[in-house]
Structures are given as structure tokens and as C-alpha cells.
Image (spheres, rainbow, N blue to C red):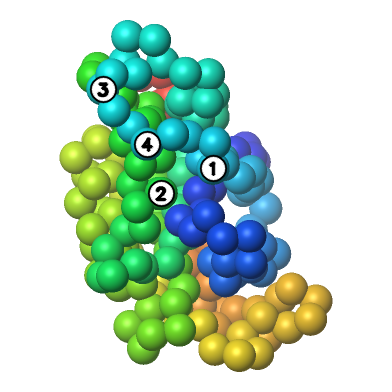
Amino acid sequence: MKTFNVGYLIGSAAKESINRKFAHALFKLAPEGLAFKEISWRDLPIYSYDYDADYPQAGRDFKKAIEASDAILIVTPEYNRSVPGGLKNAIDWASRPWGTNSFANIPSGVIGTSPGAIGTAIGQQHLRSILGFLNSPQMNAPEAYIQFKDGMINDAGEIADASTAEFLRNYLKDFHQFVTRVLTVLPRGAG
């Protein structure tokens, strides 16, 4: 079985981000065939088209990391009922200069956690709209809006609740199947 290299973006720049902790716990539940590598956006300045003529190295490196991935998974909080500004800035860098959109034809998924009762539902919907515009095939179901509670992740860095772990295990199985389907129909380098 082929192993897909999944680049992941953490939507928060905070070192102690609950979404970073959540991502690490989530990946422990992944099926064989998915290998995860973080793509950091912390070194990117605020995007402006003034950079397009002489793209900085941080922007080029970020774009290359997206393009080198078989799929992208975005693990993000929700800020003010939307996408965190730093994450949106990173996506803007990856989609520019015009005509060099690094997300095109790369399958993607979104997931996130928040202390709020609806998790990251609204932020994820905004993110889906952005990824749709960028021509990134998206896993639209199942959706995963996880409410972060004390004790959700144990001292070993694992999802502590058995039913939540099972839901997330199935989410990753579905993501693996989705990536397989998309890359069978739309092989990398075909678009």
C-alpha cells in the first residue's frame, strides 16, 4: 500500500496551541498509509503583491512544502467566528503570485478543536470556501468539530475518551480513502 505524505498546517501560532496538541494526539490514531509532516508558516511576513516580483525565500519554501505533499490537513482553531489571520496569510502566500497556486489539485481536509460548544464549525466553513476557490479537492464529510475539554488528551498525549478516539480514527480512515480516490482520478502532476 502506498504511503501518502500529508502536510499539515496548525492554524494557531501559539506554542502551546490546543490544536497542536490535538494534532499530535490525532496522528497517533492514523491508519497505515498516512505520514504527517508539519508545514510551518511562522516565518512568513504579511502577504502583499509587492513581493510577487521577488518572492522571499520563506514564501518559496512554504509553497514548495505544500506542493511536495500528497494531501493537506489543516488543524485549526476558530478566531472571531473565522479563520485565524496567520493561517489566512499563509494560504495567501501559497496561492501567489497569480497563476502559481500551490493548493491546486491537492486533496485537503480540515479539522479543529475549541473550548466552545460548536468547536470550530464556522471557521472551518470559511476555510472550505477559501480552499474551494483555490481548487483544492476537499473531504466534505465527515465533518469534525471537536469541543476541547480538560482531560480530552491524557498525559501520554493520546485522546482519552474512547468514543472520541474512535470517531477520530474513523475520520482519518475516511481521509485516507478520500486522498486515495482523488489521487487515483487526479494524479499529482496532472493539472
Task: Say which label, 4 or 2, has the lower sequence index.
Answer: 4
Task: Say which label, 1 or 3, has the lower sequence index.
Answer: 1
What SS does tag 2 mark?
helix
Circle 3: is it few (<14), some (14-19), or many (20+) Cα within 10 Å?
Answer: few
Name the front one of labels 1 and 4.
4
Disc 1/disc 4 C-alpha distance (Å): 11 Å
Disc 1/disc 3 C-alpha distance (Å): 19 Å
Q: Which residue is mark 4?
A: 46
Q: Residue at x 23, y 58 (%)?
A: 126
- Pointers 2 and 1 in contact (CB under 8 A)? yes
State the mark number for residue 86.
Answer: 2
Circle 2: is it few (<14), some (14-19), or many (20+) Cα within 10 Å?
Answer: some
Disc 2/disc 1 C-alpha distance (Å): 8 Å
Q: Which residue is mark 1?
A: 42
Q: Residue 75: image x %, image y %?
A: 48, 59
Kind of residue indicated by mark 3: Tyr
What SS does tag 1 mark?
loop
Hey, which residue is sitting farthest right in the picture? 156
Circle 1: is it few (<14), some (14-19), or many (20+) Cα within 10 Å?
Answer: few
Kind of residue indicated by mark 2: Gly
Q: Quadrant of the N terminus?
A: top right
Q: Quadrant of the C terminus?
A: top left
Q: Residue at x 53, y 55 (%)?
A: 13
Name the front one of labels 4 and 2.
4
Tell which of 187 and 15 is nearer to you: 15
Q: Residue 66: image x %, image y %?
A: 48, 32
Q: Residue 187: tell me if it is visible.
A: yes
Q: Which residue is mark 3?
A: 49
State the mark number for residue 76.
Answer: none
